[in-house]
Amino acid sequence: QEDQFKKVLSHAKEYGYVFQSSEIYDGLSAVYDYAQNGVELKKNIRDYWWKAMVQMHENIVGIDASILMHPTTWKASGHVDAFNDPLIDNKDSKKRYRADVLVEDYCAKIEGKIEKEVKKAAKRFGDAFNKEEFLATNGRVLGYQEKINTILGRLGKSLENEDLADVKALIEELEIADPLTGSKNWTDVKQFNLMFGTKLGASADTAMDLYLRPETAQGIFVNFLNVQKTGRMKIPFGIAQTGKAFRNEIVARQFIFRMREFEQMEMQFFVKPGTQKEWYDTWKETRLKWHLSLGMGADNYRFHDHEKLAHYADAAADIEFKFPFGFKELEGIHSRTDFDLKAHEEHSGKKLQYFDHAENKNYVPYVVETSIGLDRMFLAVFSTSLQEEELENGTTRTVLKLPAVLAPTKAAILPLVKKDGLPEIARKIVDDLKWDFNVSYDEKDAVGRRYRRQDANGTPFCITVDHDTLNDNTVTIRHRDTMEQKRVAISELRDIIKEEVDV
Ligand code: ATP
């Protein structure tokens, strides 16, 4: 797994997908730049989401709200008071950690022991091995599981009750050591707000303290009535938005999985109070279908229903994805009640209510939201698509099997040789296809090497112009995944590519 993750990192850099930000200055931790191919993949994912959410739903419209918002927004939303991580410092190493993550990592190690037991037993019992039964009945495994439950249960309670002294006590009782130095000399646990602050205005005494938004959702809530009125929207309806969000994350690791500056794709769906459960179930199902439509394997997804709910929610679930480092949250679906709109009513003194003609009354709608990280989705797509294949001739090839609809370049046009008029024909094909798709031209190296380069780049089609083309206007089209080659007329190319890359 670790190996696969390393390959993902180096491939993302080598093929121009993701670079570390300000790399010449040794980078900035947990901040990344999307490179020439990455920006296309990211845009295609965003478009695929937008199409499914906005274009395909008559009752969902989009907005693009600002990153900077009136500071009272974050008081109302609860972010000023409650958007915190519990931090602990090690007195010897002077390193800072998230206290809850130290405990969770400790539990992950116990989880590793369970996995080892499962592997051992599977080997011993062979075909007769039943994993479910083993997990439910094996004494040692049950012991481990109980230990994990006890620890996480206590952690959850202490955090909920703001009992930070108990979080520290838990770390000491478990004898958790600094992962880097092994020291067990800890400070007290303190809450740390994740929002980035900034200032509006030039003069020191009149400048206003602002925050960079930590989520895009609030831009939708404060615009709720403007959109509803001007768009004459009838409940149930949704407002969608994609855009940057900022969080001063302390555990900044796992590449673009957890960034300090990232992009969200969110949709807030406004419903009649009392119908939220139905809509919550509907959106859970709809969003999973969206993921499955990309064909990245149903086994890579699972739901995680939350037992412990945020202050604003009456139901919440994550769609988890199997990243190279295990199943982790990719998207959240939350039933947010009327918490946000009511809070904004209270803090702004303005009514944020909907007049329901059928019911002949005003009410504050309930909200069901779907919230997915664009960068996490990028990592999900990229890491799953990166594969190494053994070929029949004993060699291996690296191929980035991106869903064709998301691939940065749809086709590469390759003249077999750099003479005899073949480059000119290839250029003409490029000029013709570029109106419809991103295509590229490549004449360097032997054609086999060019195929490999395009495979690794994720390009679904290679189109080769050879000497026969001069006689009959046909070319070879090679499919990235099957490596099958077919002879087709130049005039058919557009339709063949369209068939594969259109949704
Ligand atoms: P986590 O528990 O992983 O910190 P979260 O529950 O705080 O995530 P939400 O506030 O629900 O996340 O945000 C919605 C989505 O935004 C997440 O499902 C994730 O895909 C994305 N996201 C959140 N934080 C980050 C981050 N630091 N970097 C990249 N994506 C993020």
Image: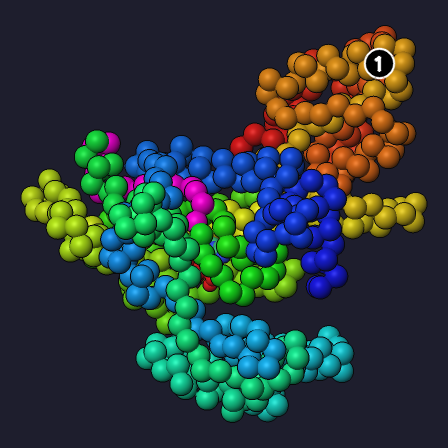
Q: Quadrant of residue 252?
A: bottom right
Say what secondary structure mark 1 lies in.
helix
Q: Main secondary structure of the magenta part?
A: strand
Looking at the image, residue 215 sits to the left or right of residue 289; the answer is left
Looking at the image, residue 482 sits to the left or right of residue 237; the answer is right
Q: Residues within 10 Å of mark 1 (few under 14, many from 20)?
A: many
Q: Residue at x 51, y 47 (%)?
A: 374
Looking at the image, residue 171 sits to the left or right of residue 325; the answer is left
Q: Residue at x 90, y 47 (%)?
A: 395
- Which kind of residue does numbered mark 1 sit on? Leu
Q: Is residue 294 above or below residue 116?
A: above
Residue in the foreground of this view, choosing between 134 and 25: 25
Q: Residue at x 65, y 83 (%)?
A: 182
What residue sits right under mark 1 in the picture?
A: 422
Q: Is residue 50 above or below residue 418?
A: below
Residue in the foreground of this view, choosing between 193 and 275: 193
Q: Is residue 214 above or below residue 303?
A: above
Q: Quadrant of residue 58?
A: top left
Residue in the foreground of this view, choosing between 216 and 408: 216
Q: Is residue 232 magenta?
A: yes
| Quadrant housing the N terminus | bottom right
Q: How many marks do you count on the picture?
A: 1
Q: Is residue 208 above or below residue 334?
A: above
**Range drawn in magenta:** 231-245
Residue 95 shows up from this direction: yes
Q: Quadrant of residue 109?
A: bottom right
Can you name the residue that lies furthest to the left here?
360
Give how far across and how far down residue 156 sits, in percent: 41, 78
Can you name the residue that lies furthest to the top here?
471
Give how far across and how far down residue 26 sits, in percent: 67, 52
Looking at the image, residue 233 sits to the left or right of residue 41; the answer is left
